[in-house]
Image (spheres, grey):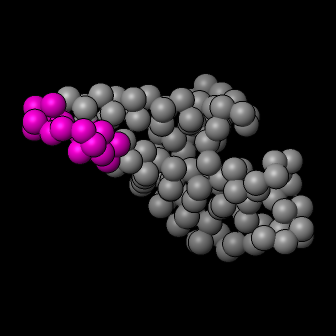
Amino acid sequence: MNDADISLLGHASSDPGTRFVPSLHADRCSGLAYLRIQASAVESYGRGSHDAHHLGLAEPAAHEHALSAVLDSVGRSFAAAAIDKVAELLVDKLDEKTYLTLGQLAASLDLHVVEDLNGANGA
């Protein structure tokens, strides 16, 4: 990414890609989305650990099983957030149909995270 791309993003971070993922260190909407994803990850890790125990998995297989459950639960959420933020960034460069399609895709991946990011859940 060159300097022009970074200035286009308008992000103060040295890693401009962080603008596209929910974070506690961004605005309130991003923080709400992050907390929702974190809660899902914690629940999934517990469920994965429980499953690993009942499957009789030993370390490191038990840990890998639990982490796989986490990745399964949060991957769609982070993808939804990234698509939503890219669409927001490029809103004036996309035709209406493309912009709406990106929004629908993001919402189909994780509607609650998209709503959090856009202030629909009390932000």
Q: Is residue 106 visible?
A: yes
Residue nearer the viewer, 10 or 92 = 10
Residue furthest to the front in view is: 59
Say above or below: 31 vs 8.
Answer: above
Q: Is residue 8 visible?
A: no
**Residue 84: image location, x then y, percent:** 60, 55
Q: Residue 93: x percent and y percent? A: 75, 72
- The residue at 64%/38% (across/down) is 23
Residue 101: give x, y in percent of width and height.
53, 66
Residue 81 in the image: above or below residue 34: below
Q: In the shown orientation, is residue 75 left or right of residue 27?
A: left
For the N terminus, the quadrant is bottom right
Is residue 120 in the magenta section? no
Foreground of the two, 58 or 100: 58
Q: Which residue is farthest left?
A: 55
Residue at 18% in and 38% down: 58
Which stretch is magenta? 51-68
